Amino acid sequence: MIDLDGAAALFAAASDLTVGLEEEFSILEPESLDLTQRFEELRDSAAERSPALHEHLAGELISSEIEIISGRGTDLADAIARQRELRRELFALAEGRGVALGATATHPWADYREQRIIETEHYRRVEEGLKYVAWRNNTFSLHVHVGVRDLDRAVKVCDRLRPVLPLLLALSASSPFLDGRASGLHSSRSQIFTRSFPRCGVPEPFGGWPAYREYIELLSATASIVEFTQVWWSIRPHFAFGTVEVRICDVQSTASDSEELAALIVACVAQALRDIDERRPFEDLPGRLIEENMWRAIRYGLDGRMIDFERGEEYPSARIAERLLAWTAPARRELGLDPKLPERNSAQRQLDLLAAGASMEEVYAQTVRETRTSYADGGPA
């Protein structure tokens, strides 16, 4: 049984605006840049060389993927400092074992049929329950956890951020290639994960903890889930950490992109909390409307146009960061956050190289070099 009383007690004791970061990397053969199934080797080597790194490593479905988890930081700066040290250790470990690491949300040409699911009880359950849907999900993400005191407030933050999720996805898009071709999408990861998994994507609004609890109780009672983590919404209260977990974003090709995006996400959660606590009026958008912007984010990323539903008109997606920064200004001032996202995100940079005449393989090689240069030293100085 899922301990919902325990979850409520955990959130009651939680602190607002603690931060945890999770970054997922592809494990690559350094010459061909093909996926290579060496997660267990890296994990075991970390146990011998660096117990601190080993403690913060995790497997993520397939053996050619590895994740580092900052743990709970008192604030964003603390979480970033923790993550930078883990990045340095992970990239040094990978180099020492003769592998490279990639940070695009899909691998451009790897065949999902050749990837092995890692041997854990959780992922055996995922594979048994989902079959093709799990096999096909060779994707890499950035997750940001933000502490929220009280589960009712946490559920309301998730509600408040529903229309923000497509905007964050457009900003984060890093996966224009899939199955050996340019997919025509800026976030092909979202198409094969978010659109395929059950209980995934943008949730319906719940209004508060009682309705969310009733939903989890129904899923549990009907054997739909046995773990709360089988609710794969793109934003969710995390019952083990006392956080709101924002799960919508593609992994970022550079450490600086990852940190600036995380800062914006923290600002969005903080502003949502502020709006809720100050009882600012907010009307939940129907899912059918948010889905329009989700598709635009998947298809066009920052090169497209989004819908402002309050005004009933479009605006350039290139203005998303500007609009989110304006909304979060009060919270950012209070927290001292000033995120500076790149003018062009990873998907755009990759597609720029393709348009200039580079092959897909050359584009990916350049992106892997960019990732190593950025992450191997931990992050921006």
Image (tube, rainbow, N blue to C red):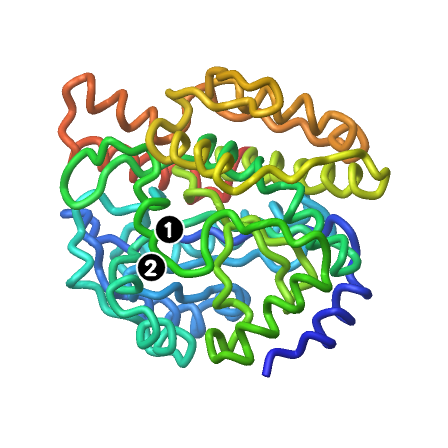
Disc 1: which residue: 140
Up the image or down, 229 lies above or below 358; here it is: below
Q: 193 or 20, which is in the foreground?
A: 193
Height in image: 210 above or below 254? below
Q: Secondary structure at mark 1?
A: loop
Q: Quadrant of the N terminus?
A: bottom right
Q: Residue furthest right?
A: 278
> Which residue is painted at 21% across and 64% down in the image?
115
Secondary structure, mark 2, is strand
Three-letter residue code for mark 1: Phe
Q: Nearer the viewer, residue 86 or 129?
A: 129
- How far apart are the two marked residues, 1 and 2, measured between alpha carbons? 8 Å
Crowd rating for badge 2 (residues with CA inside 10 Å; few <14, some 14–19, many 20+): many
Mark 1 or 2, nearer chain start? 2
Residue 224: x, y in percent? 46, 74
Name the residue at 14% across, 19% down: 357
Of residues 75 and 283, the one nearer the viewer is 283
Residue 252 drawn at (x, y percent): 43, 39
- Marks 1 and 2: which is nearer the front? 1
Residue 49: x and y, percent?
A: 44, 69
Q: Quadrant of the C terminus?
A: top right
Q: Which mark is residue 261?
A: none
The image quarter in which residue 154 lies: bottom right
Badge 1, how many Cα within 10 Å: few under 14, some, many 20+? many
Residue type at the position of mark 2: Glu
Dots 1, 2 in contact, CB < 8 A: yes
Residue ID at (48%, 39%): 288
> Which residue: 75% across, 69% down?
8
Residue indicated by mark 2: 65
Q: Nearer the viewer, residue 228 or 286?
A: 286
